[in-house]
Amino acid sequence: MKTFFKISLSILFTAIFFQSCTDNLDIVDTQTINTNIIDKIIATATSTKDLNLINSNCFSPVGTIDAPSLQGYFLNNQGDYYPALTKMDENWENNYEESKNYASQQVGVEFTDEDFFIRNIIRFDNFTEIFGHDNIVDYFNDCTFNGDSKRTYLDNSVSIAEVNFNCDAQVTYILNNKTILNLYTPGSLDKGLSPVESSVTLYNTNNNTNYTIDDVSVCDVRYSSATGVVVLNTRTQILNYFENCSYERDINDNDCLNFVYPLEINRINQQMNEVVTLENDEDLVNTFSTSAPAFIFPINLLGANGTLVTVDTIDALEIALDSAATYCE
């Protein structure tokens, strides 16, 4: 009898343990985050609008003759464009707002801070410039101006094999030694490769070099829009243009929705469920870049327009991330 009781009790405990494990697995399965959603989470956490890069400590006093100027542009999701040029002095914020309002008036649409992009920083006293996103970030980190108008061309250029010659924009060609090719015919894409090849041949003759067409890249694209000349000078922008000979931003290419911290995740492994608190975007990106943990819902996201978005499921989170542009200012 005692033996029968022990066996029955053992079976009961085993059943309870098995049921507990099964329930736990069900919970884990329902919170699994697929790769597609992880990419969206990381993209949202790492997205930063260009306006947030600007460090007011780099501004010069009002009236400083050699104060750097920031050249940029407004470009919305529909491709509406207007250039912007503001002096980087203590009046910068007011100058920027005036520039944004003027751009909106000229184009007839309401540009937002999400539509502002930095092209370069320039000092007109010695005509030096800082190009490229990474170099602009470096400048605002320490406010040190080490301008070089050529150093980032290759970093942002598109190889000749990636160029769509069916487009009719004007482009700047560059050799892989960072020398800009001076074409004796306009650098228009619809002219094809012939003038580029001729320019390479002439360069080789004058400089005793042996570059080929494969050593040539395109470092910027300039085309006319209804509101002015658009200049694209990053690799992503140029490739976007070459897809269909027009440039429009992805509707969700913005910093309109941000995670509210701290938030908790469940880092699941074979032995146990470990609850971890994330304090900032860096924590979130590092965590989701190496694993697929589960959020402990509900979590909050804050829109650029001040809207607080509360989500309590993975599906609701994906819907919010997919409609991030809804929460722009």
Image: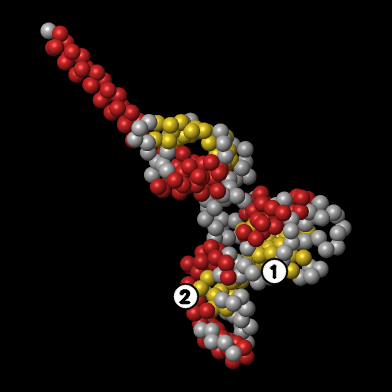
The furthest residue to the right: 63
The furthest residue to the top: 1
**Mark positioned earlier in the residue sequence (2 or 1):** 1
The furthest residue to the front: 3
Q: Residue at x 34, y 35 (%)?
A: 270
Residue 289 image position (x, y, % from top left): 46, 47
Task: Say above or below: 3 vs 312.
Answer: above
Q: What residue would you read off at disc 2? A: 161
Q: What residue would you read off at disc 1? A: 148
Could you tell me which quadrant the C terminus lies in?
A: top right
Task: Say above or below: 227 vs 288.
Answer: below
The answer to whether one can see residue 101 in this image is no
Q: Nearer the viewer, residue 294 or 84?
A: 294
Horizontal side, residue 203 vs residue 144: left or right: left
* Residue type of the residue flagged with mark 2: Ala
Figure label count: 2
